[in-house]
Amino acid sequence: MLTLYPAESADERALPFMLVLPGGGYQNRAYHEGEPIAQWFNELGMHAGVLHYRLEETIEPASLIQDVEDALSWARDPEVSFGLAINPNQIGMIGFSAGGHLAAITAVTGKIKPDLLILSYPVITFEEDYTHQGSRSRFLGEDADAELVARYSADQRVDRHAPPTFLWTSADDGAVPVENSMRFAAALSKAKVPFELHVFESGRHGLGLSEDNASCRQWLGCCANWLEHHQFIQKW
């Protein structure tokens, strides 16, 4: 299910669209990483939609990725957008934590990709030293072999076709190690894909809009500037 959050357009022109993937360890979808995030993008002059991707007892990775691709396809098709004026060439995607993993793995392996990618304290790798074990266990099962781990570790699947990416996290994240974001940034750099990475010194996992952490809350201004640089929004 895709819950839509339309932005107002004074001149009825087509606006960019941001697909929002909340985190939750592939066990649930965190509300504070859904609707409030979509509403923030509305304030920037963008339509948004929160994807309620499937979380069945046994997860099928290909089905989850297909959920995301279907949402991206919908946003690019004016025939099925329920009258929502979306610019099909300005489709972004943001993911948080495990939702960041789903966003990243879709963006680097899917047939349908966003034009821009934003990753907030994302799970990226499923390798033992740095993964979030709960997300890995839910996504791959308890006894995943090395080939499966590599296939769904997003940093190992990056190539030059990956979208420009904005990443932010905290250096002392106690749930998803900072190395996840750093590995993805390194892979983007190697593939010569534009990216911007912000690592704040201290902040708990799952901050969302970071209302209780003034330092990490800077990600909002940094992200807005980045979106302006990529011509998704006007001066904010």
Image: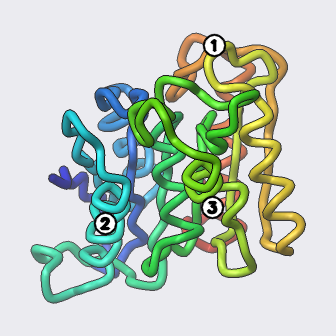
Give the residue number, with chain letter if any, for mark 3: 227
- For the residues labelled 2 and 1, the Cα–Cα distance comes to 31 Å
Dividing the picture into quadrants, the one containing residue 234 is bottom right
Rendering coords of residue 176 (x, y %): 64, 25
Q: Between disc 2 and disc 1, whose residue precedes? A: 2
Counting the numbered discs, the total is 3
Frontmost of labels 2 and 1 is 2
Q: Which mark is residue 97?
A: none
Name the one closer to the observer, 214 or 78: 78
Q: Residues within 10 Å of mark 2 (few under 14, many from 20)?
A: some
Mark 1 vs mark 3: in front: 1
Query: How many C-alpha atoms fall within 10 Å of the one at disc 1: few (<14), some, or many (≥20)?
Result: some
Label 2 SS:
helix
Is 161 located above or below residue 43 in the figure? below
For marks 1 and 3 on the same chain, the one whose residue lies earlier in the sequence:
1
For the point 52% across and 44% down, the residue is 100
Residue type (three-letter) at the residue carrying disc 2: Gln
Residue 63 drawn above or below residue 203: below
- The kind of residue on which mark 3 rests is Leu
Mark 3 lies on a secondary structure that is: helix
| Pointer 2 with pointer 1, Cβ within 8 A | no
Residue 138 versus residue 38 in the image, above or below? above
- Position of 203 with respect to 186 (left or right) is left
* Residue placed under numbered mark 1 in the picture: 204
Contact between marks 1 and 3 (CB within 8 A): the answer is no
CB under 8 Å between discs 3 and 2: no
Q: Which mark is residue 66?
A: 2
Relative depth, front residue between 175 and 143: 143
Give the CA distance from mark 3 to mark 2.
26 Å
Q: At x 15% / y 88%, what residue is drawn?
A: 79
Q: Nearer the viewer, mark 3 or mark 2?
A: 2
